[in-house]
Image (cartoon, coloured by chain):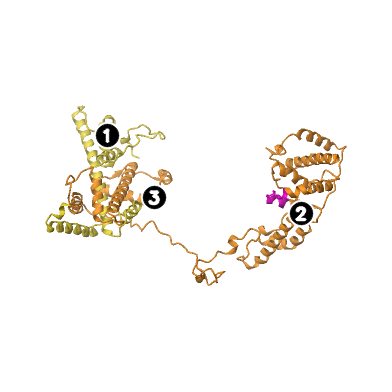
Chain colours: A yellow, B orange
Amino acid sequence: MNHNQQPGDGTHEDDAALSDFLASLMDYTPTIPDELVEHYLAKSGFQCPDVRLIRLVAVATQKFVAEVATDALQCNLECNYKVLKERHKGSSRSWQCKARQAAVVKDKRDKQQKDKRLILTMEDLSRALREHGVNVKHQEYFADSPSTGMDPASRDE
Amino acid sequence: MSDGGRESEREPEKPARQKRAGGDELARAAARLAVAQISESQGFQTFQHSALETLSDVAVRYIYEIGKTANFYANLSGRTECNVFDIIQGLEDLGLVQGFLGASDIEHCLANSGTVKELVQYVDEAEKIPFAYSLPQFPVAKDRKLTPSFLQIGEEPPGEHIPAWLPAFPDPSTYAPSSSRIERSIEPPTSKIDQESHNRKVERSLLNLHQRLACSGLEGPSLVNHGDATKAKQAVGSNPFLAAPLQFGEKEVSPVLLPAKVKLLNEAIMRNPSMENHGRDNHISVLEALAPDIEAMESRLLDSEEKEKKVLLNSRPAVQFKIGIGRKSLGTMQDLSLQKKSFEVTSPWFGRENEKDDKKMRAEKILKESMGHTQELGHL
């Protein structure tokens, strides 16, 4: 490996940085509890008594979820922004979020009211996850309730 | 910290959810909670249930994937325990979809991998959000209750070849056959009654043996009765299961369905007590003639209920039968016998729900067969 040829200080620095980071993890309490992470790691065959590694995995997962949530939020805001923009301009441009075009005319008012509360919807989530390599497709509707076939964005489950 | 981003009731969905969830319901619920907290910190106030479930499922799978990949890399290096570099490599593998700094470097030290740097950045920037609840260690490992050894009990092992540090043998009552019921009962007052009931059962089994050898009615059923009356009275008060057995006719029981071959002989044997209404003269001779066959067939009779029934039936005094040719009932019997000669013996039994009808049919059948037998014997 090349790192043998690197100056010894460089590797030591990297290692030192890493070990510092791991030590700092002990101060930082991840949102995902250690017991939960331990349970699923044990299920997958991961064996390590070191708590710092558990924290590392917990932090990594938290970062991942946060990224997905951020992307979903972005998507939500984008679509809202585009809806509002379209309402103002009154022009029919082809937006990226074509899924919402049909709903635009009906649910303008609903969107206005609900803009105050940001909802994590399946649509946003599936789009955000697709960028991370997870393909999620959800049913548009289940034909067992009176609200079948209605626009999914307009009803809260 | 409230996880009061939740809206709408979940009660109607809960039962369905519980049915779907597997064994790690607690873990999934905790994951859902953690994911909701993270999303809330990013700005979401409410969640769709399905979206939350999906995201929590994805997060769980992410943890699982990291663990699996880290384990894989550890095994690849010939280790069973994972270390930090295995995890970093796992993170790199999972992060290749999104990409990270330095992903395209062919040879780089894992310690300064792009993923680690991003993590460091995240830890520095993100605010700390502790989990809302305190989770206990799960799954809880149950302490196995080991069977104590001979030494621990203080017993002597029943044999020199058995060392004392081995687990003790179980209580004999747990594996003894049903003839001996509870040998050591928990309540002292009932132990005597148990012993008596045990004696009763032994006597009953002895009687069965007698019946098998001596073909019913010839030996008095006195063995059964003598102990029952007195002991039964004591037992009845305390335990219904220790009460004396019922005499034949006290309680209506459905007759036992037998296969064809066995049935013929059984009916030959039981003709004695079941024929109150019809009289036969020569049943003893018929039975004696059939005795060797009966003994041969007995070995095939495995139905203990049948033996019990024989005991009950044979507790009545012997009845003498006469052949009444002029009787109307017999006339009908003859018709039946003509009809049913070629039929399977068991055919009338199918579909009959009524016990009384069963008894009548049985009686008719027995009559018919003995009629047939007498005719055969007449030929001899």
Residue B96 placement (x, y as % from top left): 22, 44
**Nearer to the camera, B293 or A52:** B293
Callout 2: few (<14), some (14-19), or many (20+) C-alpha neighbours within 10 Å?
few
Callout 3 secondary element:
helix
Q: Chain of mark 1?
A: A
> What amino acid type is highlighted by mark number 3?
Glu
The image's mark for residue B25 is: 3
Is residue B304 within the magenta segment? yes
Picture coordinates of residue B220, whole percent (x, y) = 80, 56
Span colored in magenta: B297-309
- SS of the residue under disc 1: helix
Q: Are marks 2 and 1 in contact (CB under 8 Å)?
A: no
Q: Chain of mark 3?
A: B
Q: Earlier in the sequence, mark 2 or mark 3?
A: 3
Image coordinates for residue B257, horizontal then vertical, percent: 69, 43
Q: Does B313 lie within the magenta span?
A: no
- Say which mark, if any, is on residue B213: 2
Find residue B144 and report its image quarter. Answer: bottom left
Q: Is residue B375 left or right of residue A121?
A: right
Q: CA distance from mark 2 to mark 1?
A: 97 Å
From mark 2 to mark 3, how far is it between C-alphas?
A: 64 Å
Residue linked to disc 1: A109
